[in-house]
Amino acid sequence: MSENLENNNLLARWLNNDLSEEEREQLAKTQGLDDLKAVVDDISTWKLPAVDIEKGLEEARKSAVPEKKSTISISMRPLMRYAAAIIFLAVAYFGGKQLFDPQNILVETGLSQHTVHELPDGSLVTLGPQSRLEYKKKNWEENRATNLIGQGFFDVEKGSTFAVATNLGTITVLGTEFDILEAGNKLAVNCFEGRVQVSVAGKQEILSALQGLIFNQGEIKRDSITINRPTWLSGRSTFSNAALSNVIIELKRYYDVDMTLPNQYTSLPFSGSFQHNDLAAALRSILVPLEITYSLSAEGKVVFD
Amino acid sequence: MEKSLCEEEVYNRVYRQNFEKLRNLIYYKCGDLDEAGDIAQESFIRLWAKCADVILEQVSGYVYTIANRLFLSKMRSNKVALKFEKSQELQHNTEDPLFLLRTDEFRSQIETAISELPEGQREAFMLNRIDKYTYKEIAEMLEISQTAVEKRITKALIKLRDKIEEFRDYKI
């Protein structure tokens, strides 16, 4: 029964008066909903002790003096984006040449770029920035094998086994949508739909929908994910209690920024997100909540105090 | 010229609009009202100090991030026991089938059940019930999808329903 209620988040939508006629009929058979409604309505009348807002406000303003603006705003220089586009094309060209096999397909992205690539069977791969995907077009339907360096979001059509090999481990798809980030010694796999199997460091882990896994420095950690699609697809990178050093690694995949994080900041926990199209705003989103003072020069160099 | 958070009037408005909600949110996480008030206040003090750097449209996100970090560094593994102020207990009326659900005894069981929910479910459920945020607003605040909010609330509701049934069975 509980399982049934969890499907499609029926109960949450019931609470919100947001059910279709059909769903309402389906729920009508459920026992205990009248009681639940009565309790939930009662909870809605509960209160927490009131706050003396004006007193707190006065104290807050007295306790601190606003600092002078510490950043110089510049947006990403147009020249750099242009250069990134050229690098992308050049790399793809030479890469393809080197293999001497027109059947070998190589897709690469440069700094801050995404690209969507359609595989021969209609499966879609969205490559994140500074990433590289390679596969053999020949016999694709029988052997759906790809090599990935970097970050990719895969929406896989049904069919034969689909495998993604990375430097650290192999991900075999048992179902449909998943996201991979491989950076340095870290491999992160998030499964959004269906099931995938991750083979890493001699171990095999199966991920179901909305489960994720991080392999970092020889250690496998599993967690659950709460989003439907990776946020990087919509122009932001999002973190929950990530070490600041990892956030900066991700930042550098989108911006040509010269910064060295002082040691005392590397393990600060960051929860939040940054955008992919404005360096000054991205830095503010990351560093201001952590109360790190810095300045950004016109050349794109970040200096810490 | 855009409005800046460093203008007193702007800051005052932001404080008045957000303080209590932030205090409540931290309370759902940590279960200590004084600590929640301190964390919320400290977050706003730090926000004022940094007012020049904050983009006004993103102010609630900033202050939430600061508060969350303070919360993580201070509390983490404390056991949570939430307490709320409630309306009066209903007069005893055995005719009313819902009477049992409004007794102090039952309400404190529900409080315990809520306190025992995983942090994410508790937070989403209480933000919706007590602070009247919509699912969409909660999703934006916690930086998760609306479906994820619905999932957390659904799970919380299933646990409450089980708790109610358990209580009814025990009483009858």
Image (cartoon, grey):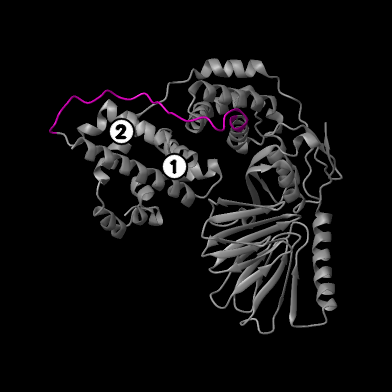
Nearer-the-camera pick, B106 or A27? B106
Instruction: Name the amino acid, label 2.
Output: Asp
Q: Is residue B136 left or right of residue A254?
A: left
Magenta stretch mostly in which secondary structure? loop
Q: Can you tell which quarter of the image residue B83 is in?
A: top left
Circle 1 residues within 10 Å: few <14, some 14–19, many ≥20: some
From the top left corner, tell me how far across and down residue A127 is, in percent. 69, 64
- The residue to which callout 2 is attached is A42
Residue tagged 1: B134
Residues in magenta, as a range? B71-95
Tell me what residue is drawn at x 44 percent, y 46 percent: B152
| Chain letter of the residue beneath label 2 in the structure image | A
The chain carrying label 1 is B
**Where B21 falls versus A3 (above or below)?**
above
Tell if the residue under mark 1 belongs to the same chain as the one under mark 2.
no
Q: Is residue A30 left or right of residue B34?
A: left
Task: Name the spot of residue A156 as percent of width and height, x first.
Answer: 58, 70
The residue depicted at 54 percent of the width and 68 percent of the height is A176
In the rendered image, residue A153 lying in the magenta stretch gets the answer no
Tell me the quarter of the image containing the N terminus of chain A.
bottom left
Q: Residue at x 63, y 30 (%)?
A: B73
